[in-house]
Amino acid sequence: MFRIKICGVTSIADAVAVADAGADAIGLNFYQGSSRFVSVARAAEIAAALPDVTQKIGVFVNLPADEVRQIAARLSLDWVQLHGDEPPEFLASLGGIRVLRAFRLQAGGLPAVSNYLAECQRLDAMPGRVLLDSFRASAYGGTGLVLDWQMAASYHQLSAAPPLVLAGGLVASNVAQAIAAVRPAAVDTASGVEESPGRKDHAQTMAFITAAKAAFAAIGR
């Protein structure tokens, strides 16, 4: 399992820097509407440069299931992150691939998450982890908006809830406070360690990972 994920990696240099800084996982974004989009060919080059211990997570938004399965197999992805409007039946169609299901939370959005997970449970298609992100109607993630941490913390009260990955506006200066408040299993950032969309700032990346590791140690994880 991973604790610290740096998402939206688009270059080999950034991937190597992220891995060297101690991140457990990187996110490769296959959503063409994103400024952090990478082609499958480019993603393969990035993946080949990573050490074996760094997990590779493919980010998908409303792509057909057969294409998701093909890309996951070609790149030997450790996780598939579904960040769009995929229904629970979509997870059931992925054939055992580990799924990180993302939800963009609006005010009072946790009942919808609970209902979604209940249907996944009924279909025997529970995601391995759930990612909570902030909501902006015009974007599927990577907005830089800070999530409501109090609402995110109440996720733990849901029955049979998979481990939580916290995203949404996390940066080096607030990630420790977020971990203390929400107590997630993992954290995820994209824009929070960038100099521009898709280009990572290596100093910010190191600062984020260092702060997150210390915060996880402080809560015994």
Image (tube, grey):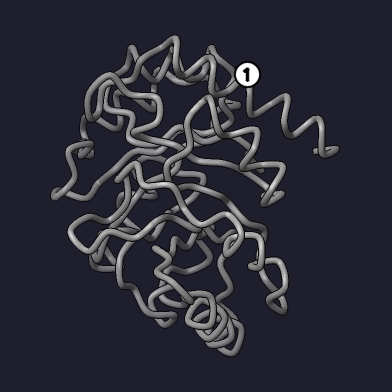
Query: Of residues 149 and 160, which is closer to you in this image?
Result: 149
- At x 39%, y 20%, the residue is 15
Q: Position of residue 147 (x, y in %)?
A: 47, 53
SS class, disc 1: helix
**Mark 1, residues whose alpha carbon is within 10 Å: few (<14), some, or many (≥20)?**
some
Residue 212 picture quarter: top right
- Percent from the top left, x then y, of residue 207? 54, 16
* Image quadrant where one finds the N terminus: top right
Among the 4 quarters of the image, the one containing residue 94 = bottom left
> At x 48% / y 47%, what residue is drawn?
167
State the count of labels. 1
Q: Is residue 16 positioned above or below 169 on the image?
A: above
Would you name the residue on which mark 1 appears? 210
Q: Is residue 209 left or right of residue 200?
A: right
For the residue pair 3 and 170, the one nearer the viewer reads as 170
Specify the amino acid type for callout 1. Answer: Thr
* Residue toward you, 107 or 31: 107
Residue 124 % position (x, y): 60, 82
Most distant residue in the right direction: 220
> In the current view of this chain or complex, which residue is farthest to the left?
33
Q: Residue at x 57, y 64 (%)?
A: 151
The residue located at (44%, 55%) in the rendering is 133
Whole-percent x, y for residue 139 in the image: 22, 55
Q: Eyeballing the image, is 3 above or below 194?
A: below
Residue 122's quadrant in the figure?
A: bottom right
Location of the C terminus (image quadrant): top right
